[in-house]
Amino acid sequence: TERTLSIIKPDATNRNLTGKINAKFEDAGLRIVAQKRIKLSMEQAGKFYEVHKERPFYGELCEFMASAPVVVQVLEGDNAIAKNREVMGATNPANAEPGTIRKEFALSVGENSVHGSDAPETAAQEIAFFFSGLELV
Ligand code: ATP
Ligand code: MG
């Protein structure tokens, strides 16, 4: 079993899509083992997305992620990292498979409803960024 960090992004929380998105995770066999609603500052968003700081969309991405509350969560299951990315669908909703979160809910490549860790190392880092040991059982 494996854990991954998921974020329900502002475009989705603004449209009250948290429950529908969580149903997709649970239907795929992913267990929500921790979850909270927080509002990121620009500084926190910038730190979280530091790996993208040279990309042209970095400023826009950080402003978007700090624009409204997000739901951060830890998902657990067999191959949770890959399974979560499968359920999310392609980064650009135009390329996402039918039935995926991004195909059904994303507005654009930027406002694409969800984030998911991309590897075991980043999953561990990203979980520790948002959750303390006490919050993880
Ligand atoms: P995430 O890391 O959010 O799970 P991802 O791994 O599919 O998504 P990345 O390449 O890591 O995609 O990009 C991180 C985020 O940056 C994307 O989810 C998206 O919100 C934003 N992004 C990526 N490419 C673009 C772009 N061309 N224009 C605007 N925003 C973008
Ligand atoms: Mg990524």
Image (cartoon, rainbow, N blue to C red):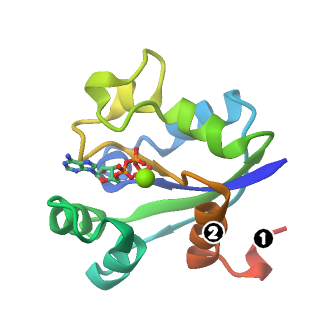
Cα separation between marks 2 and 1 = 10 Å
Residue placed furthest toward the bottom = 43
Image quadrant in which you'd find residue 122: bottom right
In the image, is 45 to the left or to the right of 129? Answer: left
Q: Secondary structure at mark 1?
A: loop
Question: Residue 66: x, y in percent?
Answer: 28, 70
Please name the residue shown 70% across and 81% down the image: 132
In the image, is 127 to the left or to the right of 133? Answer: left
Res 127 label: 2
In the picture of the structure, the residue carrying the numbered disc 1 is: 136
Residue 101 vertical position relative to residue 47 in the rendered view, above or below:
above
Question: Which of the pair 57/9 is nearer the observer?
Answer: 57
- Tag nearer the camera, 2 or 1: 2
In the image, is 59 to the left or to the right of 32? Answer: left
Asked if the residue at label 2 sits under 8 Å from ligand 1, the reply is no
Please name the residue shown 29% across and 48% down the image: 11
Res 58 label: none
